Image: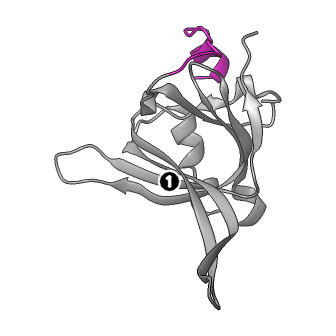
C-alpha cells in the first residue's frame, strides 16, 4: 500500500494531543525508482507484529577534578527494528526480503524512508541501510517470521505529510 492510499483513509489533525500506539506511526520506504515523492513510498505494515523506532547513541565519559563524571553524546543514529509474519506478495516485504536486500552490500541496500504520525503528519525522512537478520524463522506449525533492522545513514530531516 502506498502512503497516499493509507492517508486517504485518515484526516490529518496537526493539533492532535494525546497518547499514541504503534499503529499511529507510518513507516514507509522507496522500493522503486519511479517513486519520486514520499506519498508514493510503500508502507511497511502487512504482517508486521512489531516495529520499534529507536535512537542509538554513542557517548564518551570523562572524569574532571571537583566536578566529577561528565558524559558527552558523540553521535546518534536512527534505527527501526521490524519483525513479523512473512506475507508473500506484500510489496514492502517482497522488496525488503529480496535477494538484493538480503545479500547486498554498500549503497545497494540504502533506501529512502519516511516515518510520521498518522494523526499530525509530523515526523522525519532520511535514508536507511537495510539489514535482513531473519528471512524465514519460526516454529513448526507456526507462521514463518522475519526480522529486519533499518539503520539510519545520516541525521534525518523533519518531514510533514500533507494531504493532496
In this picture, residue 19 sits left or right of residue 16? left
Q: Is residue 102 magenta?
A: no
Image coloring type: one colour
In this picture, residue 125 sits left or right of residue 62? right
**Residue 157's x, y, as percent?**
78, 42
Front residue of this view, candidates 46 and 119: 119
**Residue 16's x, y, as percent?**
56, 17
The crowding category of the residue bearing disc 1, from other C-alpha atoms within 10 Å (few below 14, some 14 to 19, many at least 20), is many
In this picture, residue 46 sits left or right of residue 11? left
Q: Which residue is mark 1?
A: 148
**Residue 133's x, y, as percent?**
47, 61
Q: Secondary structure at mark 1?
A: strand
As drawn, which residue projects farthest toward the front? 66
Residue drawn at the location 16% of the way across and 46% of the way down = 141
Q: Does residue 25 lie above or below 127 as drawn? A: above
Residue drawn at the location 58% of the way across and 62% of the way down = 56
Residue 1 quadrant: top right
Q: Is residue 30 visible?
A: no
Secondary structure mostly seen in the magenta stretch: loop
Quadrant in the picture for the C terminus: top right
Label count reads: 1
First to last magenta residue range: 1-17
Amino acid at each position: 500500500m502506498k502512503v497516499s492510499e493509507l492517508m486517504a483513509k485518515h484526516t490529518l489533525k496537526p493539533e492532535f494531543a494525546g497518547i499514541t500506539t504503534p499503529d499511529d506511526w507510518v513507516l514507509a520506504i522507496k522500493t522503486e525508482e519511479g517513486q519520486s515523492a514520499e506519498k508514493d513510498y510503500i508502507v511497511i505494515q502487512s504482517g508486521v507484529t512489531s516495529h520499534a523506532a529507536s535512537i542509538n547513541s554513542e557517548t564518551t565519559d570523562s572524569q574532571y577534578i571537583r566536578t566529577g563524571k561528565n558524559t558527552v553524546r558523540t553521535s546518534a543514529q536512527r534505527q527501526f527494528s521490524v519483525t513479523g509474519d512473512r506475507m508473500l506478495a506484500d510489496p514492502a516485504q517482497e522488496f525488503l526480503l529480496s535477494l538484493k536486500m538480503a545479500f547486498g552490500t554498500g549503497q545497494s541496500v540504502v533506501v529512502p524512508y519516511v516515518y510520521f504520525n498518522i494523526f499530525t503528519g509530523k515526523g522525519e525522512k532520511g535514508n536507511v541501510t537495510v539489514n535482513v537478520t531473519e528471512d524465514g524463522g519460526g516454529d513448526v506449525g507456526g507462521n514463518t517470521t522475519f526480522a529486519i533492522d533499518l539503520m539510519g545513514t545520516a541525521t534525518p530531516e523533519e518531514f510533514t505529510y500533507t494531504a493532496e
